[in-house]
Amino acid sequence: MPVTPPAPPAPPFPPKAYLPPTPPPPLPPRQLSSTPPARRGGTGKVVAAALVGAALAATSFVAGGLVLDDPQVATTSASSNPTAIPTAAPLTGDEAEPVVAVAESLSPSVVLIRTEDGLGSGVIYDGQGLIMTNAHVVGSARNVEVSLADGSTLEGEVLGRDTATDIAVVQVDADGALPAALLADDEPRVGQ
């Protein structure tokens, strides 16, 4: 009697044939409108760029039209004080890394401003303790905490704020003169 080899075991499931993926359902029909679709992003970007430019220009002119609680501050400026006030180091003109040169020059004048609602930055623009910041940083606070670049902390009083231009001035009382930012003496030119 001849011996027949056993049949190979049957697969547990019959093999599935390849089926192409199901296409997505069709999109709903568009509603035709007589008004053109609204443009996105163009106006907002222009407004944001204008606000940034206005804030930078305002720092050059230092508190010209602020709404101040103390009118005496409006007449005080660093140039009217004959006492020598330390300023940030002047730029050396590092042509390879101009941003680094600016950062190194201004970093001693940059402060951290802390309120009950949050924190932000400011710039010492007068060695006697006047600090320029944004109105949204100080909010409605009357007093703030100011941390200097050397790590020391001082109490500051919000002298005035103008929410329309988002500029505010804070005054701190320091034992010595503070490192004021060296701002431009000349009128800015178009493109600066």
Image (tube, rainbow, N blue to C red):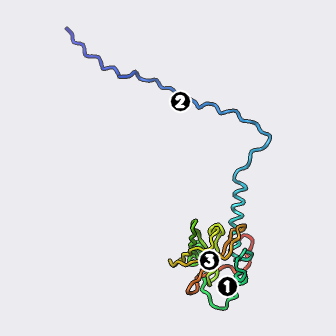
* Nearer to me, 99 or 28: 28
Q: Residue at x 59, y 73 (%)?
A: 144
Q: Estimate the spatial distance between the alpha carbons at disc 3 and disc 2, rounded to whole Å.
A: 68 Å
Q: Where is residue 10 in the image (x, y as percent from the top left)?
A: 33, 20
Q: Quadrant of residue 110?
A: bottom right
The residue at which mark 1 appears reads as 78
| Count of residue discs | 3
Relative to 165, residue 30 above or below? above
Tell me the kind of residue under disc 2: Pro
Residue 21's label in the rendered image is 2
Q: Which of marks 1 and 3 is nearer the N terminus?
A: 1
Q: Residue furthest right?
A: 34
Q: Position of residue 16 (x, y in %)?
A: 44, 24
Q: Estimate the spatial distance between the alpha carbons at disc 1 and disc 3, rounded to whole Å.
A: 19 Å
Q: In which quarter of the image is residue 51?
A: bottom right
Tell me the kind of residue under disc 3: Glu
Q: Which of marks 2 and 1 is nearer the N terminus?
A: 2
User: Which secondary structure lies at badge 2?
Assistant: loop
Which label lies toward us, 3 or 2? 3
Position of the C terminus, as image quadrant, is bottom right
Tell me the kind of residue under disc 1: Ala
The residue at which mark 3 appears reads as 157
